[in-house]
Amino acid sequence: MAAFELTGRCTVLDRQEREAISGTGMLADVATRLKGHRRQFGDRVIGVGVAVPSPVSAGQMVQPTLPDWQDVDVADIFGADDGHEGLAGLVLAGNDATLAGLAEARRGVLRGVSVALHLHVATGIGGVLLSGGVPVPGARGSAGEFGHMPLTGGSEPCRCGSVGCWELDAGARGLLRAVGQPDEGDRMVRAEQVIAAAATDPGCGQTVERVAEALGRGVGALVNAQDPEAVGLSGLAAEVYQAAPDAVRAGYLATLMRFRRPEPPALLPSTLGDLGALTGASELVFDAFLTPRGLGAWPAPEEKTA
Ligand SMILES: [Zn+2]
C-alpha cells in the first residue's frame, strides 16, 4: 500500500505478505487499513488505484489466479462507505501485470519508447503493449494474457482452460514444474528460491537456464507479432534475465525473424521493482483525474471549507 504524488514521489504505507484468503475478505481488510492511512492525507486524496492478479473487465476480476477471487467487484469493495469516512469517489482497478507495464512507460525503463511491450512474470505471465505510452487494452480491457499462448509444443492442460500454455514452461509454474515441485501454494517464494540457488546448485542452474530460454523464445514470438521498439521485463522475468541473460538471449534470437536479428529490440529489466504494479495503479487514477471531467469534479478550496 503506497501513496503517490503527481511528481511520482512515493511513500510506502504498509507492506505485508499475506496468505491467500478469499478475495472479498482480503480486499475488505486492505480497504479498512487504507481508510486508516487515508486520514493523514485529508482532502489531498483524489482516488484509489488497485492492482489485482487477474484480468479486469468493468471493475471485476474475470479469471483470477486464485479461483476464490472470481467475479470479485474491486470498485465495490473499495468504494463502499464513500463519504467523509470513506476512501474516495474514484476507485479504479487493473491487472497487476498491465499496470506494471504502464508504470515502466511513465516512470521506468520504457519511458519515451514509441511502441513498447512489457512482460511481467509471476505465477503466470502477463503484460501489455503500449503505443505512445498508452496501453492497448483490448475490446474488454483484458489484453496481455501472454502466458496463455500455446508455446510449449505439448497439450498439457492449463488452469486457464487452454492447453500447452507458455506459462507452463516459463514463469513460476514453469520453474516449479521443471524442478519437480508441486504446482500449488506460494509459487513465487519457491520460484525465487530456485533462482537464488542457481549460482551454487547445478540442478537449479540448469532449470533456470531452461526456463530462461523458454522465456526468450516467447519474447521472440511476441516481438515478431507486435514489432515493439523495446521490451520491458519485471517480476520473475527480470530475475530470470539477471540470473541467465545468455539463455534468455539465445531463446530470443532463435525465434526472431531473420530481418529483426541485426538490431533486436532491447530487453530492459525493470527499475521499479515490486512497486511497479502500484505505481501503474496510481497512473490509472491520475489519468482519470487529469481530464476536464476529473478536474471538474474536484472541489475548489473555498467549496471545501464552506
Ligand atoms: Zn493457459
Image: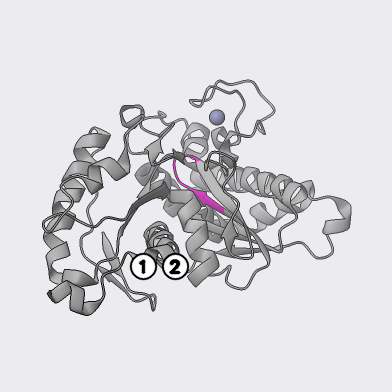
Would you say residue 207 is visible in this rendering? yes
Residue at point 37% right, 42% down? 190
Residue 55 is marked as none
**Is 121 contained in the magenta span?**
yes
Q: Quadrant of the C terminus?
A: bottom left
**Is 16 contained in the magenta span?**
no
Q: Secondary structure at mark 1?
A: helix
Which x, y percent locates residue 59? 38, 42
Which x, y percent locates residue 229? 71, 64
Q: Which span is picked out in magenta?
A: 119-124
Name the residue type under label 2.
Answer: Pro
Q: Which residue is mark 2?
A: 292
Q: Which residue is mark 1?
A: 296
Residue 16 vs residue 144, the one in the foreground: 144
Residue 222 vs residue 59, the one in the foreground: 59
Residue 289 vs residue 270, the one in the foreground: 289
Q: Secondary structure at mark 2?
A: helix
Would you say residue 236 is visible in this rendering? no
Q: Is mark 1 within 8 Å of ligand 1?
A: no
Q: Quadrant of the N terminus?
A: bottom left
**Which quarter holds ligand 1?**
top right
Residue 183 vs residue 263, the one in the foreground: 263
